Amino acid sequence: MGLTGNNVLVLAIASAMALFVGTVWLWPRLARRSWRAVSGRVGLLFATQLALFAALGLGANQAFGFYASWADLFGQEDEQGVVMDHTANGGSGGPLQVTDVGRVKETGSGRPQRAGQIQQVDIVGRTTHIATSAYVYLPPEYFQPQYRTRTFPAAVVLTGYPGTARALVDKLHYPSTALELAKDGRMQPMILVMLRPTVAPPRDTECVDIPNGPQTESFFAKDLPDAVLAHYRVGKKPGSWGVIGDSTGGYCALKLAMHHPEVYAAGAGLSPYYKAPIDPTTGDLFQGNEELRNRADLWWYLKHEPAPDTSLLVSSSKVGESNYKDTLKFIERVKETDRTRISSIILESGGHNFNTWRREIPATLQWISGRLSDR
């Protein structure tokens, strides 16, 4: 049974309830002072609490999409992607391969001309050799005959760490939100490329080109756009691409837009931070390279590098987010530049969680749509 399956959650809840009832029922029989009775009480309490914590943990993981599988949870997901070359009889070769096709679940239609389509893809970086999976949302217009020669703007959408790409579809509802906003005329039809920034699991690479390690920033700045451009009708001129992310993905989105404005005309960070952390999940990201460390610090970058010609959006809440003061400071710092535009979403209250980001996503999609070109 998979980690995110309903059967596992139901089994954990049932086990916790059964152990609780069993503890209440057996407690009088274990009230003696013998070592067997004491061991029985300790065993029942331990088993009940373990089952309760397991049920709560599984429920939280289903709600927030922290881990995709048991291997992911226990840090065993370390298998690298394999490049497969396909012949004319077996499919088209290239850095992006479609592995599955689905519809936008919130709609009543299975026709892509009416509801769009979600494609699961495998991507292999031509220069970085990083392999990862992603979900691509194609709007209904992509399949309509009158738009067959049209190109579309694209936004890369990133999770936090560790995160799962599927959560962007099922929990944060990016495709269905984009579909409804476009139908209402509040945003233009866009392609969404949804994935997690953890492209070398289980390591948190913070979208950094790690010396002698994964070249994560280069993957998102060059390989990913190149792979998507080779497969889909995406605008090729500057101004066609944006990037959105939450938490770790929010930091990555801001950094990518600031470091690579020629690629990303806009970057939106939902609940972001502004400096790459160093902790057990990241390891030594910079290997003593002070220049690389400085570039990953957005405060340093704003002060010492030329202001990038890009648009940024940051979000926070007055109550519930730890980044509130830093976000206000970041806004003022960007306002001092002469070329970088800054916008914000500040809620009265909201924690660092999916519910908060769902409240911010519609406005974020409208904002980024207004800053991208389809040519």
Image: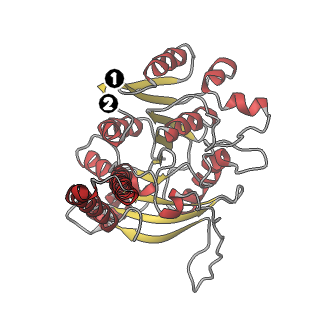
Q: What residue is rendered at 71% in x and 31% in y?
A: 293
Q: What residue is rendered at 47% in x and 41% in y?
A: 245
User: Residue 151: in sight, yes or no?
Assistant: no
- Confirm or deny contact between disc 2 and disc 1 (CB under 8 A): yes
Compare residues 140 and 163 and report the one nearer the observer.
Answer: 163
- Badge 1 local density, few (<14 within 10 Å), some, or many (20+)? few
Answer above or below: position of 109 versus 278: below
| Residue 179 point in image, percent of width and height | 29, 52
- Badge 2 local density, few (<14 within 10 Å), some, or many (20+)? some
| Residue 298 point in image, percent of width and height | 61, 26
| Residue 260 point in image, percent of width and height | 62, 37
Answer above or below: position of 14 versus 364: below
Q: Amino acid at mark 2?
A: Gly
Q: Which residue is mark 2?
A: 350
| Residue 31 point in image, percent of width and height | 27, 53
**Residue lying furthest bottom in this view?**
89
Determine which quarter of the picture holds residue 120. Answer: bottom left
Identify the element where label 1 is drawn.
strand
Q: Which residue is mark 1?
A: 319
Q: Amino acid at mark 1?
A: Val
Question: Is residue 141 toward the left or the right of residue 268 in the image?
Answer: left
Question: Is residue 3 toward the left or the right of residue 144 in the image?
Answer: right
Question: Is residue 27 toward the left or the right of residue 57 in the image?
Answer: left
